[in-house]
Every structure is written in C-alpha cells, then in structure tokens.
Image (spheres, rainbow, N blue to C red):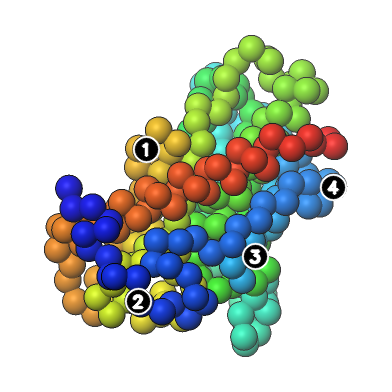
Amino acid sequence: MVQIKDMLSDGKVLRVDGRAVDELRPVTIRRNWTEAPEGSVLIECGNTRVMCTATFQQGVPRWRRDSGQGWVTAEYAMVPRATDQRTDRESVKGRIGGRTHEISRLIGRSLRGVVDMKALGENQILIDCDVLQADGGTRTASITGAYVALADAIAWAKKKRVLKESRKVLLEQVSAVSVGIIDGTPMLDLPYTEDSSAGTDMNVVMTASGKFIEIQGTAEHGPFDRDELNTLLDLATKGNKELQRFQREALEKASEK
C-alpha cells in the first residue's frame, strides 16, 4: 500500500486555514448541550457546528414489533442561516430534499453498524442532527457527534434500569471524516472552500477497530487511481483515529445526567 508520506507534498502546500495536509480542523465535543434529551452534543469541527441529540423511546416501529430487537434511526437538517445565505426550512417547502434524505439515512446506517439490536431490546433511539453553521463536512461531523449522544442515551437508559446493565449495547466507536484531492494533493478534513474545488471528494465512516461502514467517493473533475484511493483511505484512517480519541475524552468527563 502506498503510504501517506509517499503521495503527499513536501509540506509547502498552503491550505486556506494554514493546516498541514494530514491535519484535522480543531475539534470540540460538548456533551449535555441541551437539558431535555437523553443525549445531547454540540460538535465543532473548524467552523462547522452541529447539534446532535439522542432520544430514547420504549417500543419500536410497528414493523419491528415482536422481533426482540431495537432500532436506531436519524434525521438531519440545516437551520435557515447555517450558510451565508438564508434557505427556507424544508418543512415550509412541504417536501424533504434528496440530499437531506440521503444524509439522514447515512447517519442512521453508521450508528446501527455499532449497535447490538438484541441488547437494545424493543426500544428505539432517535437521532437528530441539526447543522447550526456549515463549513464543509456536516455529515461527517453529524456522525461523529451523534455517536457521543447515542452513548449518553444508552447510559441514561441503563441508569434508569430500562436496559440491563450487563448487556453491551454499543459494540464499538464510529466516526467519519472527509478527504479529497485538491490541485493534485490529497488532504484531510475539507472545509467548504476546499470541498467545492476538490477534484476527488470522499467521506469515510470507520469503526474503532478500523473497519469501514461506508465510503462515499466521487471524482468531480477527473478520475483517481488506486494509489490515490489508498492514500485517501490512509488519511481517513488517521483522521478517524483522532476523532475517536476526542469522542473518548468527551465521554470520560463526568456527566451531570
């Protein structure tokens, strides 16, 4: 496999925010951001800010009843002034856009990939990810923050004895990060200015054990080869390991709930 150092530049590439090509934007994960939900997180990745909440509900959708298994689902949305120009709420338009549906499903798949549904029992956890400020990587920040909110919701359910303390519901961590090729250089964690000009753009969802849940990759302005793909996956692996460290550090802090 081609190593990152073999494909990256000599370090003279200047990114818009001064980072190295294999460096994450500053990351902050704040738990208990709002009081009502069983899990609530504000995640900041550079200038991207997403509020992630997890709601624990006893019972499952009708199609899941009597299965002995739980369910995790997600909804994603952007507030009207998350970007430079105001956009109407999709609920006002009367329809949810294709991009919103696609990201919601991605978040749900990513979290279900690390949950033992039998251990969850016939309960469901609803994840809501609301983008407060968008500067690239909103879907990846949503997944990374939602995992922490999900963990808190499960901990709440065990504390309230809704779930058996002995059963392990969360199998491992999951996070996501963007990578891309800009002017021939592979880069990690793209803000909007880089994302919008990337020749190749990719989102990578990974578990703590290094397994992939989803890889979304597109050549926007020209095809990429296997060596470039390997380099991007190496970058994503590095970034996800760092994000999972931030998750662990956030969860190790004492919770007031």
19, above or below 244, in the image? below
Q: CA distance from mark 1 to mark 4?
A: 33 Å
Nearer the camera: disc 2 or disc 1: 2
Quarter of the image where the C terminus is located: top right
Determine which quarter of the picture holds residue 121. top right
Q: Residue at x 50, y 48 (%)?
A: 242
Whichever of callouts 3 and 2 sits on the residue coming sooner in the sequence is 2
Q: CA distance from mark 3 to mark 2?
A: 29 Å
First-in-chain label (2 vs 4): 2
In the picture of the structure, the residue carrying the numbered disc 1 is 210
The tag earlier along the polypeptide, 1 or 4, is 4
141 horizontally vs 202: left or right: right
In terms of depth relative to the viewer, which is nearer, 252 or 159? Answer: 252
Report the amino acid beneath label 2: Lys
**Alpha-carbon span between mark 3 and mark 1:** 26 Å
Q: Which residue is mark 4?
A: 35
76 left or right, relative to 24:
right
Q: Residues within 10 Å of mark 2 (few under 14, many from 20)?
A: few
Q: Secondary structure at mark 1?
A: loop
Discs 2/4, front: 2
Q: Residue at x 45, y 36 (%)?
A: 208
Query: Does label 3 or label 1 sit earlier along the sequence?
Result: 3
Label ID, residue 12: 2
